[in-house]
Image (cartoon, coloured by chain):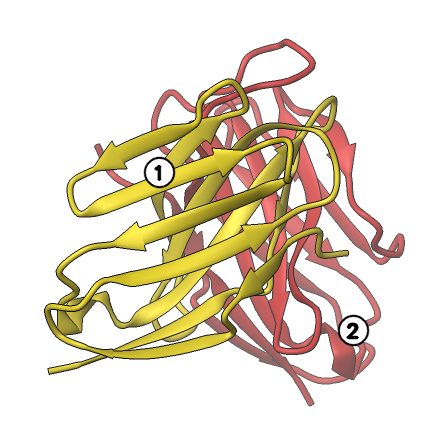
Amino acid sequence: KAGVTQTPRYLIKTRGQQVTLSCSPISGHRSVSWYQQTPGQGLQFLFEYFSETQRNKGNFPGRFSGRQFSNSRSEMNVSTLELGDSALYLCASSLATSGRTRTDTQYFGPGTRLTVL
Amino acid sequence: SQQGEEDPQALSIQEGENATMNCSYKTSINNLQWYRQNSGRGLVHLILIRSNEREKHSGRLRVTLDTSKKSSSLLITASRAADTASYFCATEDTGRRALTFGSGTRLQVQP
């Protein structure tokens, strides 16, 4: 099975612009989660989507949004970019269930490295 | 916010030695997972241990979990240069479908 893919791998933007990142989960996986990794804050959870619905959200401002399509592919959008948004953005997929909790494994993609100038 | 504190922050050993990393967390969890990351790339899943398990093995990896102390350890036996990476513990908190990551341990294995 192909792993989680993320596009683009690298991105350079300027302050005030917006950006859209894409994630294709492993075939058959229905849950997609997004994480931000920075040297200062480490790995932080952004949000999770399951069956096109956002199920869980981290503590990020409304400039960060996402969506999931019927084929489970997901996009993440950041509007009005700030210098502090420079980070590695990681997407993870899992089989998941419709239940409230889970004990399944999340598989991560290679990430998109976003640089904001 | 990060839940876990990992100890040590950095570890340098010789090939063939064992490497032990520790992780502490604060809340009740469903499971705890360990991941490896090479040079700012994606995370590779190593092992998942559920809250009702105390020890788990996978190849050269041994993970223990002590829920009374809210701590876990990852042991890599017979380390290789290819094990050089950052290692993160991540907890899935009870009732929350998200992983909370520790700060990571940078492991350097000298050939």
In the rendered view, would you say B100 is above or below A82?
above
Q: Residues within 10 Å of mark 1 (few under 14, many from 20)?
A: some
User: Which residue lies under the disc numbered 2?
Assistant: A81
Label 1: which secondary element: strand
Q: Chain of mark 1?
A: B
Q: Residue A112: x and y, percent? A: 50, 65
Q: Quadrant of residue A32?
A: top right
Q: In the image as oriented, which residue stretches furthest toward the bottom? A: A117
Q: Chain of mark 2?
A: A
Give the chain ID for the yellow colour.
B
Q: Quadrant of residue A21?
A: bottom right
Q: Amino acid at mark 1?
A: Ile
A3, B90: nearer the viewer = B90
Quote the CA–CA distance across marks 2 and 1: 36 Å
Residue A109 seen: no
- Whether discs 2 and 1 lie on one chain: the answer is no
Residue B84 seen: yes
Label 2: which secondary element: loop
In the rendered view, would you say A77 is above or below B94?
below
Residue at (78, 45) in percent of width and height: A58
In this picture, residue A44 sits left or right of residue B87:
right
User: Which residue lies under the disc numbered 1?
Assistant: B47
Q: Colour of chain A?
A: red
Q: Residues within 10 Å of mark 2 (few under 14, many from 20)?
A: many
Q: Residue B72: x and y, percent? A: 50, 44
What quarter of the picture does the C terminus of chain B occupy?
bottom left
B72, A97: nearer the viewer = B72
In the rendered view, would you say A73 is above or below A95?
below
Task: Tell whether label 1 touches label 2 (CB within 8 Å).
Answer: no
